[in-house]
Image: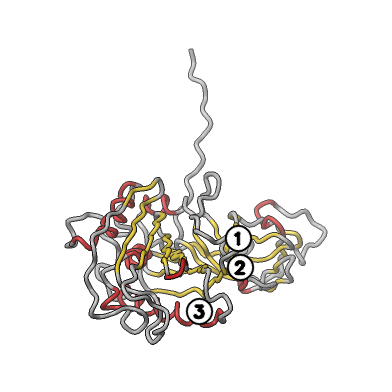
Amino acid sequence: MSAVPQSPAPAERALPRDCTFLAEDWRRLARCWYPVALERELGPAPLGATLLDVPLVLYRAGEEIVVADNLCPHRGVPLSMGRGDGRTIACAYHGFVFGTGGRCKHVPANPDNNIPPRLHLRTYPAVVRYGLIWTCLEPGGDPAIPPMPHWDDPAFQQITCPWIDIAGFAGRQVEGFIDVAHFAFVHTETFADPDNAVVPPYMPTPTPTGFEAEYRSSVGNYPIGVSDRGRPGFEWLRHFRVHVPFTATLEIHFPDDGRLVIMNAASPVSARKTRMFAPICRNFDRDLPVEDVYAFNRRVFEEDRAIVEAQKPENLPLDPTLEAHVMADRSSIAYRRALRAMGFSSFFSA
């Protein structure tokens, strides 16, 4: 019998220009979901963003948010340089107009001709959650956007803080967020006590998407100078939920059944730059200005940023023998183990 002819396999997508990741790591990361912008910062004009070295443009097309490659298919000019009206965007070079689904709707130089399919934009899914616009470069199913405890609870106030750019790798930034041993040395200007550096024993628990860890200690979480909020002998519970590769939530149990939840969503612009998004919800102090929350959150993450940007190697070594570890590093060890289980190496290209 003659062989049955086989359909050719679809061509593998080319890596982005000047890709900073190992090819196999980029392809795994491209299947995950990340925030790329605050919903409130997207107005009628197109907005540029970068994810995993891929330049993107975001724009509104009526009720739809479009995420697409940030290059006009005609002559390669970034569409974020163009103009928009909330329904379409127009390229700054030749005025080509794009609307819903990234489809080219109008070519001013040849308005009566058929529009070739190659002028339509390559688009990506867009999901709004926690006040953020999330997307995925290689979607393979339902959005696997990490959950955030209490965000939809009417007893909680929802706050989406401005993003922070960090000249460092997303994995290093996330590792710093879940690290409980650095409080007494890094956050002494915001909330921590330099004389309270002991980390009580704790044990991470694996989950299908990463791990969880509950950490109890006497380290408070009120801003320094606020003296009327604490309770003598109160045991603070910090509940971390890590969703690999680069998202974690921290739920802090305050006195009087108060809860504060912070999401740390590290969006990898490249292997050397991270845009960190931080939605917050809480069931106390709901009458205080959100600008105060923005300011305090910024101060805390600026303290972390200085450390992350100074770390060497810049990537996150997943081989456990490449850096030393102590008992307080159990979350860091669990994080690296979860990334290895997903098949990642160390993220930087050679």
Q: Position of residue 309 (x, y in %)?
A: 32, 75
Image quadrant holding the C terminus, namely bottom left
Task: Give the residue drawn at x 36%, y 79%.
Answer: 191
Q: Which residue is identified by label 3?
A: 294
**Foreground: 293 or 226?**
226
Task: Give the residue drawn at x 35%, y 70%.
Answer: 168
Nearest to N terminus: mark 1 or mark 3 = 1
Q: Residue 128's mark?
A: 1
- Cβ atoms at labels 3 and 2 below 8 Å apart: no
| 164 left or right, relative to 102 | left
User: What is the spatial separation of the Cα atoms under label 1 and label 2, in whole angstroms?
Assistant: 7 Å
Q: Position of residue 25 (x, y in %)?
A: 37, 53
Using the image, determine if residue 307 lies above or below residue 138.
below
- Cβ atoms at labels 1 and 2 below 8 Å apart: yes
| 68 left or right, relative to 166 | right
Q: Is residue 241 visible?
A: yes
Q: Which residue is identified by label 2?
A: 39
